Structure formats: structure tokens, C-alpha cells
Amino acid sequence: MPGPGEVVLEVDVALTCATDTKMLRAGSHPALGPLPAGFGHECAGRVVARGLGVAGVSLGERVVPGNSAPCDRCRTCRRGRPSLCAEPRFLTGAFAPLLLVPPRIVRRNLLRIPDGLALEIAAMAEPLACAIRGVERSGAGRGDAAVVLGGGPQGVFLSWLLARRGCRVVLCDPHPERRERALAFGAASVAAPPDGSGALAELVELTAGGADVVMVAVGRAEAWRQAFDVVRPGGEVNLHGGCPPGGEIHLDAHRLHYDEVTVRGSFHHTPETLRAAMAILSAGEMPARALLDAPIGLADLARSLAAGGDKRPVDVVS
Ligand SMILES: [Zn+2]
Ligand SMILES: [Zn+2]
């Protein structure tokens, strides 16, 4: 039985995520508790038990639990930055048949799945919410040339959201199939990453002289550095894909000043962007299903995470 304020979910769908791979490789992550810790943070399921005092959610209801909830009391929360909450409550352990959702997440971030929205699509609310947060943090607007580095799920979500804002998006990825896919997510054109002089020249041409906004959806220092080759004077670089601790890049300090280049980071999501993500997925305008690879069983999970790659639905009872 769940304790006061808690809810038990029967997990119908859990998705793999590049963050799970990072957690596995590093053995630690801000969202992962002390080891041994449950894995899996993107899921959808049904409420099968409710603790005392749980209101607003009924048994059998289809829901997505946010993988965190802010405290709403710390200084950063009070200053309107709940994604940076000093005392967040995280939730992992979705790669299991049942998931106990703690009271704060039940209160703050247990999202009802709209009728007609498939569970495996609804489970993408969390990663999409992070991308929404990233684009909200940017100054991207109508008519801007936007470059997205990285064509994984975050890259294509960013691309779709930037295109919706009226940007002309160029997405860069070394893999042709990812570039092809990005065209269905709003990218006006695609290119190889600017890691060679030819690719950089092509990108400068595609953006008519450089990007107003570069969003880096890759957690590698080399990609972060490339972003500064692509941004135009007065432009902005948003470091959206997290690097491992201790990662460093060297920047041309002269350019940062004389070209007034803005540098931002964007991390995680907020209760508002989680809800906005569910609304976008429910509207069905984004071809989100294209991000799902073939399902796997629990027995294949560790191997699949170690290999990285796209999102895979995990059959949590096999
Ligand atoms: Zn994730
Ligand atoms: Zn807080």
C-alpha cells in the first residue's frame, strides 16, 4: 500500500533516454539517487493504488509522472526558476512493472493523459518539456536563422519548436538517417556537423552568414566549441546537452565581447513546460512516433543503454 500522498502506477510504457545512458556510464547524475538506484524516468501508466489524502486522480486513470518536482520554496523556485530548484525531488525506477510516485510529484507533476493520446507518445512529455524549456530560454524569434547541433530526440524537438517560432532551422548531424528524419521535424535544411572547413563553409552559406541562435543538443565539449564557429555577431549559443563534470572548452574572449555573443545553458524542465509538452503531443502535429525504435525487453535493457541510440519502449514485464 502506498503511504500518505503517494500513488502506485502500473507502468505500461517506459522509454529509454540518452540521460539513462549518461547515468549508466558515469554511475551518477543529478537526477539519480545514491546507488543502488532505480533506472528509467520516462514512462506512462495507470494508477492502481492511492495513499491517504491523494486528490484529483482516480484509480485506473492514465498518467505520466514527471521525473521531478520542485520544492516551490527555495530561492531559485521563488525567483521563477523551478528547473534549478535547490531541493528537487527526482523520480527514477520506471523500468519496472510498478512505480511508487512520491507525494510531491503526485501533487505537482502527475499529468493526466488526454483521451486518444497513445501511452508511448505521452511518455515523451518529459524530454519534450526539456526542449521547450531550452527554446523558452533562447531569444529565438521569427525570421532568425537557427542551427541545431545534434539530430537525436532533443535535437529534433528543438528543431520543431524553433520552426514553430518562425525560425529557419538547419539541423546538423553526422548520420544521414537522422538528417533525413529532422526534415519531418521542421528543419528547413540539414547538414553535416561543422567539424571540417567544408562543412562549416556550407553551414555559413545555409544560414546566409551565420546563425542568430545555435542550440547544442549534444553533450560533448567539441560540439559546444563548434557552436561558436557558427554563431554570427549578436547571436546566441545555447548549451542544451549536458557535458560530463570537468568538461572544458576554450573560447575566443575577444569575439565574445566584440561580437556580443550570448551564452546560455538550459537544463531540465518546469511544471509548466511539462504541461505544454503534453498539450503538443496530444495535438498530434509533431511526428513523435518517428523517434521510437523497436521495443526491447528488460533483459536487453543494459546492453541497449550502453550502446546509446534512439528511444526504445521497454517491455517492463518481460
Ligand atoms: Zn529523459
Ligand atoms: Zn526549490
Image (spheres, rainbow, N blue to C red):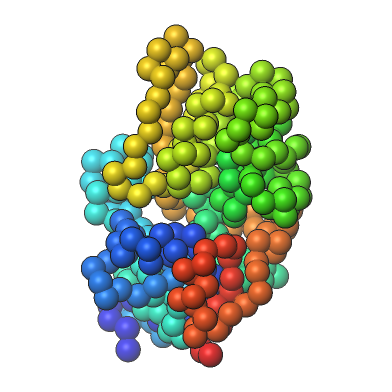
Q: Quadrant of the rendered structure where residue 257 is?
A: top left
Residue 228 visible? The answer is yes
Question: Residue 195 versus residue 304: which sits nearer the camera?
Answer: 195
Q: Residue 308: image x %, image y %?
A: 52, 63
* Placement of 249 over or under 173, stated as above or below: above
Which quadrant is home to the N terminus? bottom left
Question: Residue 45 versus residue 78: which sits nearer the camera?
Answer: 45
Q: Residue 28: image x %, image y %?
A: 30, 62
* Placement of 81 over or under 277, stated as above or below: above
Rendered residue at 44%/64% (across/down)? 21
Rendered residue at 75%/50% (across/down)? 180
Relative to 167, 130 lies left or right:
left
How many marks do you count on the picture?
0
* Placement of 307 over or under 259, stated as above or below: below
Q: Residue 2: image x %, image y %?
A: 32, 83
Q: Residue 174: image x %, image y %?
A: 64, 47
Question: Residue 180 versus residue 127: which sits nearer the camera?
Answer: 180
Question: Residue 270 versus residue 137: which sits nearer the camera?
Answer: 137
Residue 78 visible? The answer is no
Rendered residue at 45%/47% (across/down)? 219
Relative to 187, 245 lies left or right:
left
Rendered residue at 41%/47% (across/down)? 242
* Placement of 246 over or under 70, stated as above or below: above
